C-alpha cells in the first residue's frame, strides 16, 4: 500500500486566492457591468523590455543552428550570467563573490521552498507574521511543523508578529530558533529594515548558529539610503545567510522564470555531532541531482538586463511601478487611511478603518469601489485588520482605483 506524505494533510488548502476568486466571481455574476480593477495579486503588468526580448530571440536563433546549438547547460547556471550578477548586483555594494557561490534557478519561490531540503527536519523555523506563505507551507510539507491550530497558525513554528506597534519590524525571538526567514523589502507589508536592524538578526544567527534565509526579491525597488540591498552588506552575514533574488518583479520575468540564490562558501550547518558542513557544497549536490538548469534563451535574456539598454529599460519599469506606489500611498493617506510600505517596495499595507476585519474590508472595497485587493489575514494571523494593495497595475487603473476609494468609500 502506497502511503501519502501525511504532512500535506496538515495544510488547510490554498484558501486565500481561491476565496478571493470566489467572491469576485459572485460579485461579477450579480453586477455584470461593474468595471473591476485588480490591485490584488503580486504579478506585473509591464511587458518584457526590448533589450531582453532581442537577447532572447537571438539566443533562440543560436539554438536553431548546429554550430551554436547548446544542450544541457551547467545545473548551477552559465558563468556569463553569474559573472554579470556579481559585477553588477554585488560589487557596487562592496560584496565579493565567486561564480560558484551563485546558483541560477527558475525562481525564488522554487529556491526558498527547496533550500530546506538540505537542512535538518528538526530545525525550529521562525517566520515574520504576516508572511509570504511559501516559507511556511514548504516547511509544513517537509515535516518541520506540527498541526494547524485554532489560532490559524502551525504548532512548532515561531511567529514574529509585525504590527503597527512595532512598525512592521520583527523582534528577535525569545526562544531559540534555527532557521529564520526574512524578506526585506517585505511582501506583504512593503516595509524595510535598516542596516542596524538587520545587523541584530545577523548577530543573533551568529550567536545561535542559526541560518537566515534572506529573500531580497524586491531589492530593486529600494529608493532610500541606508536600506540594505543585500544581507551581505552586513558584517558577518556571509557565515550565516543565504540570499534569494529574482528577476520576476525587477524585470517582468514572472512568466519567463529566472532567479538566483547566493550561498557563500562560509555558510555552515551542523550534523548531530556538531561538525560543520558547507551549505554551498550541499546545495550544489542537491541542485546537480534534482535540477537541470534554466534554459539558455532565458539566461541569455536575463544577462541582457545588465546591458546599458536593459538597465535603462528596467529602471523605467521600476519607476513606473514606484510612481503607482506613490499614487496609492498618498491617495490613501489623503483619504484618511493609516498606511505602511509603498516607499521602497511595490506594496502598500493599509490598516482597515474602524478595526473592520480584512475580509469585511475586502467586501466593502469590492462592492463600493469595485477594487480587488488582498486581505491581510491571508498572510497570517497578525495580518488581520490590514489589507494589501499592489503597485503592479497599470497607471490608468491605479489612478482610477484611488479616485474611487476617495469618492465611494
Ligand atoms: C514574487 C516573490 C518572489 C519571486 O518568486 P519567483 O519564483 O522568482 O517568481 C519571491 N519572494 C517573494 C516574497 C515574492 O513576493
Image: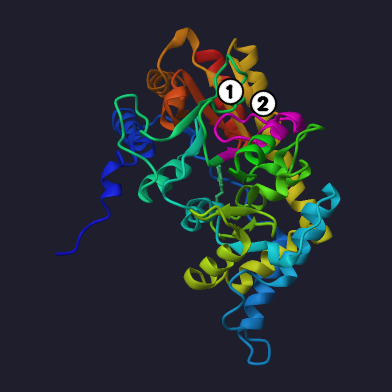
In the drawing, what numbered circle is on residue 100?
A: none
Magenta stretch holds residue 186:
yes
Task: Classify residue 18 by image quadrant.
Answer: top left
Q: Residue at x 64, y 15 (%)?
A: 333
What residue is at 69 percent from the left and 62 percent from the top?
101
Q: Is residue 358 left or right of residue 53?
A: left
List the residue tagged with mark 2.
Answer: 327
Vertical position of residue 176 compared to residue 212: above or below? above
Q: Does 92 sit above or below residue 229?
A: below
Whether residue 39 is visible, yes or no, is: no
Percent x, y of residue 314:
73, 50
Per the rendered image, the range of residues in magenta is 181-201
* Image location of residue 165, percent across then percent down: 58, 14
Badge 1 element: helix
Is the residue at mark 1 in contact range of ligand 1, meaning its CB lies under 8 Å from it?
no
Q: Quick check: is the Cβ at mark 2 less than 8 Å away from ligand 1?
A: no
Residue 236 sits in quarter: top right
Is residue 378 in view from this perspective?
Answer: yes
334 lies above or below 17: above
The residue that mark 1 highlights is 402
In the visual, does 197 lie left or right of 178? right
- The residue closer to the viewer here, 341 or 51, is 341
Mark 1 in CB contact with mark 2 (< 8 angstroms): yes
Write down the quadrant of residue 357 in the picture. top left
Calculate the distance from the C-alpha at mark 1 to the C-alpha at mark 2: 8 Å
Query: Among all residues in the image, which is located at the extreme bottom?
Result: 66
Residue drawn 58% across and 83% down? 71
Residue 105 lies, in percent from the top left, at 58, 62
Amino acid at each position: 500500500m502506497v502511503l501519502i506524505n501525511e504532512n500535506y494533510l496538515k495544510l488547510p488548502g490554498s484558501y486565500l486566492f481561491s476565496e478571493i476568486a470566489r467572491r469576485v466571481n459572485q460579485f461579477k455574476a450579480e453586477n455584470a457591468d461593474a468595471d473591476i480593477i485588480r490591485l490584488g495579486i503580486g504579478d506585473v503588468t509591464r511587458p518584457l523590455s526590448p533589450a531582453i526580448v532581442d537577447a532572447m530571440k537571438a539566443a533562440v536563433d543560436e539554438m536553431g543552428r548546429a554550430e551554436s546549438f547548446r544542450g544541457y547547460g551547467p545545473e548551477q547556471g552559465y558563468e556569463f550570467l553569474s559573472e554579470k550578477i556579481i559585477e553588477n548586483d554585488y560589487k557596487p555594494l562592496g560584496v565579493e563573490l565567486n561564480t560558484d557561490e551563485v546558483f541560477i534557478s527558475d525562481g525564488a519561490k522554487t529556491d526558498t521552498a527547496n533550500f530546506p531540503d538540505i537542512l535538518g527536519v528538526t530545525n525550529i523555523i521562525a517566520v515574520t507574521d504576516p508572511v509570504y506563505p511559501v516559507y511556511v507551507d514548504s516547511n509544513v510539507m517537509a515535516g518541520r511543523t506540527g498541526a494547524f491550530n485554532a489560532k490559524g497558525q502551525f504548532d512548532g513554528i515561531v511567529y514574529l508578529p509585525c504590527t503597527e506597534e512595532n512598525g512592521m519590524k520583527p523582534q528577535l525571538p525569545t526562544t531559540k530558533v534555527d532557521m529564520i526567514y526574512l524578506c526585506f523589502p517585505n511582501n506583504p507589508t512593503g516595509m524595510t529594515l535598516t542596516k542596524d536592524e538587520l545587523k541584530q538578526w545577523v548577530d543573533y544567527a551568529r550567536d545561535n548558529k542559526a541560518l537566515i534565509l534572506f529573500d531580497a526579491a524586491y531589492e530593486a525597488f529600494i529608493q532610500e539610503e541606508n536600506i540594505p540591498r543585500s544581507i551581505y552588506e552586513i558584517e558577518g552575514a556571509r557565515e550565516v545567510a543565504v540570499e534569494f533574488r529574482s528577476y520576476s518583479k525587477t524585470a517582468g520575468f514572472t512568466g519567463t522564470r529566472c532567479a538566483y540564490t547566493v550561498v557563500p562558501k562560509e555558510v555552515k550547518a551542523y550534523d548531530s555531532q556538531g561538525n560543520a558542513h558547507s551549505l554551498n557544497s550541499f546545495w550544489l549536490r542537491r541542485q546537480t541531482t534534482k535540477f537541470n538548469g534554466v534554459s539558455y534563451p532565458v539566461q541569455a535574456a536575463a544577462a541582457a538586463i545588465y546591458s546599458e539598454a536593459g538597465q535603462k529599460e528596467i529602471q523605467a519599469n521600476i519607476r513606473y511601478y514606484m510612481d503607482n506606489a506613490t499614487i496609492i500611498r498618498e491617495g490613501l493617506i489623503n483619504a484618511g487611511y493609516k498606511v505602511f510600505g509603498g516607499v521602497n517596495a511595490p506594496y502598500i499595507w493599509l490598516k482597515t478603518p474602524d478595526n473592520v476585519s480584512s475580509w469585511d474590508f475586502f467586501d466593502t472595497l469590492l462592492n463600493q469601489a469595485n477594487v480587488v485587493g488582498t486581505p491581510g489575514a491571508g498572510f497570517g494571523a497578525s495580518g488581520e485588520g490590514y489589507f494589501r494593495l499592489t503597485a503592479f497595475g497599470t497607471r490608468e487603473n491605479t489612478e482610477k482605483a484611488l479616485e474611487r476609494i476617495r469618492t465611494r468609500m
